[in-house]
């Protein structure tokens, strides 16, 4: 299978660009990936990471906030997809912030100061890249619930952090990709955090198991809600796509329900 | 109805009354509150520019979008933002609402440049301080309209963001101070109702003279979280929804009106529900080649048709046995029938059956089964 061929996910995200002329379509946009314990949405992050670091655009920079996995994990996964993260890191195109063991100082002030410092790091990376004329910057957070854990459950500060990152997207035109787990909020009557994120998101990608149960050929379904796609005329519309996926060793197969033979 | 909101915001406050206030509330099932907000913002802006409104200026408190976003938006709608006479001021509570950037700059860790500074919006670095927020809004407003009696409008694009940093009582204080300020012509704000307790939404609604609520066309069964299993339904809700407006008059009268809205081409359109229903009804009728309705003439003709089983009652009273008639009546009825057989040709128009027996061999009315010799 040709890795460069656009698939259904690219189409749903508006990443299909034959002539490579258009600017990065996710710029100034927030992508929220929601997954569940039965279906991990990590592959969507990997896909976006690979797209953002694709070789034809050397101006792209990714700032990766890793709360869930070490660098070697992403390096292995992305290598299978045909993208060398170590090389990209040496080229200053991939900034990996390892936050696995980061613990913010105790107390209310400590949580906030930790997040402020983290934001400062990101802002510095983004603004220096921007000044180096690398205009296409993607900030990836994997994953948001662990960020909340790292901040000792200070939800309000984590949301503040997210809003500051959102402000970065409009200031520098960067895109923000956040992974979060939907089902950990399912018992809360008013899950303010995930609702806030859904209000913020321009593109919402949900990875869910099939409603009909487990299947060997199909690993789950993706629902992509793309709010306000702007076309050439400047008009915009919402778009909803739903398709099934199958995660394979070196890539993911996407297909419409029922079209797999 | 969306027009009546625009009119109320445009006409502004009466002397000695609170300014009209509008709450726009939505939920995640139909998150089009921001569309309504920008719609009202552009309508009000064009009214202000055309000098049709009571107010001569607008103060926009931007929490959820950057000032440049709003300036772009107004430019796209052909509203002259950079006109010679300043009429809009944006209080930027988006770029650095908590002073983090400021703190980072002070400690020498932050990025240096900020593109937002060029838009000319005034930056608010501490949104937790309600008194500061109030005074800066009023200052900005007075900066547009000058001293005197001229009023200005206030628009707040997200009450939720203020509520994350301050208690409901202090936010209510801020809003009611703004409403009762004699320089404010009208005020409107957006709130996502599912981010807070019902009580908070109720407080906001109490303080507003108009409440515009945006609801999905089909409320999903599991409440506020949208139902992803029913994709067509979801898709349906992502184009349109219901728009309810509650007006509270001075005398306490409350009027509720409903409309439907339709989001297309980055604009939001409103139309009354009744007309929409008619269209639906018309389209629901199947398209068939034959006519399902009768014309008036056809109906009259149809009424004239004599059905064969119907008692025609030509001149005589129609007697239909209803199971209650007495036996004596039945006898008197029975007798003329037997007489009628004898007087056959009295009324020639009546049909009759004449039967002549061929011979006496033929037994009349035999009870015998003619087939009883068959061995089945």
Image (cartoon, coloured by chain):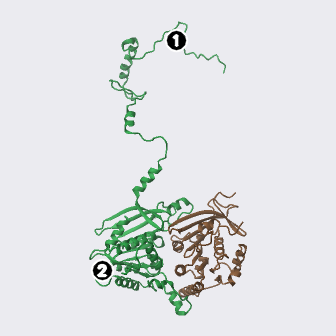
Chain colours: A brown, B green
Q: Residue A136 or A117: which is nearer the viewer?
A: A136
Q: Can residue B230 be seen in this view?
A: no
Q: Residue B24 or B1: which is nearer the viewer?
A: B1
Dot 1: element: loop
Residue B370 vertical placement versus B279 (above, below): above
Q: Earlier in the sequence, mark 2 or mark 1?
A: 2
Dot 2: element: loop
Which quadrant of the rendered structure holds the C terminus of chain B? top right
Query: Is disc 2 in contact with disc 1, using a CB cutoff of under 8 Å?
Result: no
Q: Mark 2 lies on which chain?
A: B
Q: Name the residue under label 2.
A: B150
Q: Residue B2 or B173: which is nearer the viewer?
A: B2
Q: Is residue B146 visible?
A: yes
Which quadrant of the rendered structure holds the N terminus of chain B? bottom left
| Relative image position of residue B68 (x, y in whole percent) | 47, 79
| Relative image position of residue A68 (x, y in whole percent) | 65, 78
| Relative image position of residue B177 (x, y in whole percent) | 35, 80
Q: Mark 1 lies on which chain?
A: B
Q: Name the residue under label 1.
A: B364
Q: Residue A50 or A210: which is nearer the viewer?
A: A50
Q: In this view, does A172 lie to the left or right of B23?
A: right
- Where on the picture, by quarter, is residue B175? bottom left
| Relative image position of residue B203 (x, y in whole percent) | 39, 73
- Between circles 2 and 1, the one closer to the viewer is 2
Work out which residue is located at the far left of the displayed protein and give it: B15
Residue B291 vertical placement versus A151 (above, below): above
Q: State the separation of the CA atoms marked 2 and 1.
A: 115 Å
Circle 1 packing at 10 Å, graded few (<14), some (14-19), many (20+), is few
Circle 2 packing at 10 Å, graded few (<14), some (14-19), many (20+), is some
- Where on the picture, by quarter, is residue A207? bottom right
């Amino acid at each position: 299978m040709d890795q460069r061929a656009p698939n259904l996910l690219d189409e749903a995200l508006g990443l299909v660009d034959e002539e490579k002329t258009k600017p990065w379509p996710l710029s100034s946009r927030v992508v929220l990936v929601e997954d569940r314990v039965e279906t991990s949405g990590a592959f969507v992050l990997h896909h976006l990471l690979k797209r953002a670091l694709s070789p034809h655009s050397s101006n792209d920079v990714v700032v990766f906030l890793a709360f869930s996995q070490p660098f070697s994990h992403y390096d292995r996964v992305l290598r299978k997809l045909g993208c060398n993260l170590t090389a990209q890191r040496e080229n200053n195109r991939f900034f990996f912030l390892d936050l696995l063991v980061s613990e913010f100082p105790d107390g209310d002030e400590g949580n906030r100061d930790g997040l402020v410092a983290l934001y400062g790091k990101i802002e510095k990376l983004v603004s220096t890249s921007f000044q180096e004329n690398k205009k296409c910057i993607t900030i990836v957070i994997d994953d948001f619930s662990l960020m909340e854990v790292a901040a000792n459950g200070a939800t309000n500060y984590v949301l503040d952090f997210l809003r500051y990152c959102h402000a970065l997207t409009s200031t520098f035109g960067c895109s923000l990709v956040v992974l979060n787990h939907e089902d950990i909020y399912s018992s809360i009557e008013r899950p303010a955090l995930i609702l806030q994120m859904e209000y913020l998101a321009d593109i919402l990608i949900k990875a869910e198991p099939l409603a009909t149960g487990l299947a060997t050929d199909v690993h789950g379904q993706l629902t992509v809600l793309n709010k306000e796609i702007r076309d050439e005329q400047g008009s915009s519309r919402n778009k909803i796509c739903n398709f099934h996926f199958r995660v394979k060793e070196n890539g993911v197969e996407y297909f419409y329900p029922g079209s797999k033979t | 109805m969306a027009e009546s909101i625009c009119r109320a915001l445009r006409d502004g406050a009466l002397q000695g009354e609170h300014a009209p206030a509008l709450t726009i509330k939505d939920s995640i099932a139909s998150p089009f509150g921001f569309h309504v907000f920008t719609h009202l913002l552009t309508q009000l802006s064009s009214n202000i520019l055309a000098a049709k409104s009571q107010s001569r200026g607008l103060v926009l408190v931007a929490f959820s979008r950057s000032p440049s976003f709003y300036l772009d938006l107004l430019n796209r709608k052909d509203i002259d933002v950079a006109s010679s006479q300043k009429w809009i001021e944006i209080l930027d509570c988006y770029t650095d609402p908590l002073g983090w950037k400021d703190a980072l700059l002070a400690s020498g860790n932050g990025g240096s440049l900020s593109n937002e500074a060029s838009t000319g919006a005034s930056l608010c670095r501490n949104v937790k301080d309600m008194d500061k927020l109030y005074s800066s809004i009023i200052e900005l407003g007075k900066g547009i309209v000058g001293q005197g009696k001229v009023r200005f409008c206030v628009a707040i694009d997200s009450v939720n963001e203020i509520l994350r940093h301050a208690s409901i009582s202090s936010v209510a204080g801020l809003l009611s101070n703004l409403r009762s300020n004699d320089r404010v012509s009208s005020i409107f704000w957006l709130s996502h109702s599912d981010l807070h307790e019902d009580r908070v939404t109720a407080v906001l609604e109490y303080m507003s003279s108009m409440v515009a609520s945006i609801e999905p066309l089909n409320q999903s069964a599991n409440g506020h979280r949208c139902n992803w299993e029913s994709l067509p339904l979801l898709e349906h809700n992502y184009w349109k929804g219901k728009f309810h407006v509650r007006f509270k008059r001075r005398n306490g009268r409350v009027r509720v009106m409903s409309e439907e809205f339709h989001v297309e081409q980055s604009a939001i359109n409103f139309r009354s529900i009744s007309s929409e229903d008619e269209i639906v009804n018309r389209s629901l009728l199947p398209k068939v080649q034959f006519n399902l309705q009768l014309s008036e003439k056809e109906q009259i003709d149809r009424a004239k048709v004599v059905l064969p089983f119907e008692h025609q009652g030509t001149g005589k009273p129609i007697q239909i046995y209803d199971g209650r008639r007495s036996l004596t009546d039945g006898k008197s009825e029975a007798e003329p029938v037997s007489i009628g057989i004898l007087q056959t040709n009295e009324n020639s128009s009546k049909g009759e059956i004449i039967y002549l027996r061929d011979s006496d061999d033929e037994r009349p009315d035999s009870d015998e089964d003619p087939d009883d010799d068959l061995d089945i």
